Image (cartoon, rainbow, N blue to C red):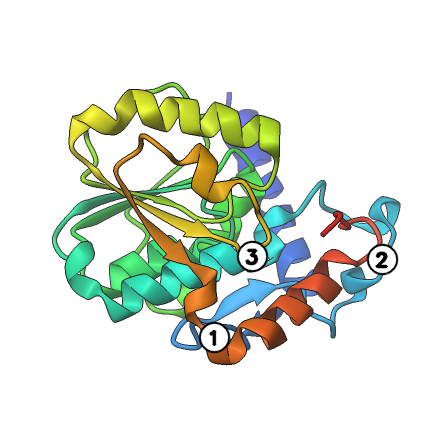
Amino acid sequence: MWIVPFFVQWYKKTYRDHILAETDLSRDHLTPEIQLYLITQNCRLWRARPEDSPFCEPFWAFYWPGGQALSRYLLDNKAVVKGKRVLDFGTGCGASGLAAKLSGAGHVTFNDIDPIAAEVVLLNGTENKIDIDNFSTVNLIGSCCQNFEVLLVGDMLYDTEFADEVLKWLRSEHEKSFIFLQGICCLYWRSREICTGIPSIEVKFEVFSKIRIETIDCIRKQWACPGFCVDI
């Protein structure tokens, strides 16, 4: 039976080795207080074809604008999460959850269905000297959130069909008295319409007026990478 745990440890080490080899440790974003392993323009995968990547859909390797806005908001408004139980839904690189920890959250659960994201969050936690309380790879859509006081949702509304699914779940949960913080990218045109009926704080990306155009241009180039392109 020792073969199973050995294989799991080997698999995790393989994940970690690939992450360290294919990403840069970066502070070049809206939250320079937090170092993150990201695919940047200096990385091979920035222009690589999908078949040349060791990762399948590495959403965790990019610091999406809504997530940046949300993380910046938490660092500038620490009282929102101080001492509270927080869920970082669709955590990706873990930036929003790490920002919550830096802001004094009592306990943070990082959640992402991609197991590689779990390794990335652990690496990012280590680099920032932040303990990771808990990581879940369970698909939480449709589950109960009553154990949490604050729910963080970064750039998770990137697709209309998926956004409808997420928001249907959030609407069903909104009576549980948690605070819902959503990082809204200004590129997602339906955000205001579909959030109707959910008591939330919308963290608008546009609030960073001085750097919005420059950052959006950076994200535009980032999304334009072969293999990771979307229409904007």
Say which mark, if any, is on residue 64: 3
Task: Identify the residue at image location x=53%, y=46%.
Answer: 117
Name the image quarter holding residue 170. Answer: top left
52 left or right of 71?
right
* Secondary element at tag 2: loop
Name the image quarter holding residue 85. Answer: top left
Q: Earlier in the sequence, mark 3 or mark 1?
A: 3
185 left or right of 69?
right
Q: Nearer the viewer, residue 16 or 169?
A: 169
Task: Identify the residue at image location x=61%, y=58%.
Answer: 62
Q: Earlier in the sequence, mark 3 or mark 2?
A: 2
Q: Please tell me whether residue 209 is drawn above or below residue 103 in the rendered image.
A: below
Cα gap from disc 2 to disc 1, whole angstroms: 32 Å
Q: Please tell me whether residue 147 is drawn above or below residue 15 in the rendered image.
A: above
Task: Identify the residue at image location x=29%, y=62%.
Answer: 74
Residue 223 visible to the viewer:
yes
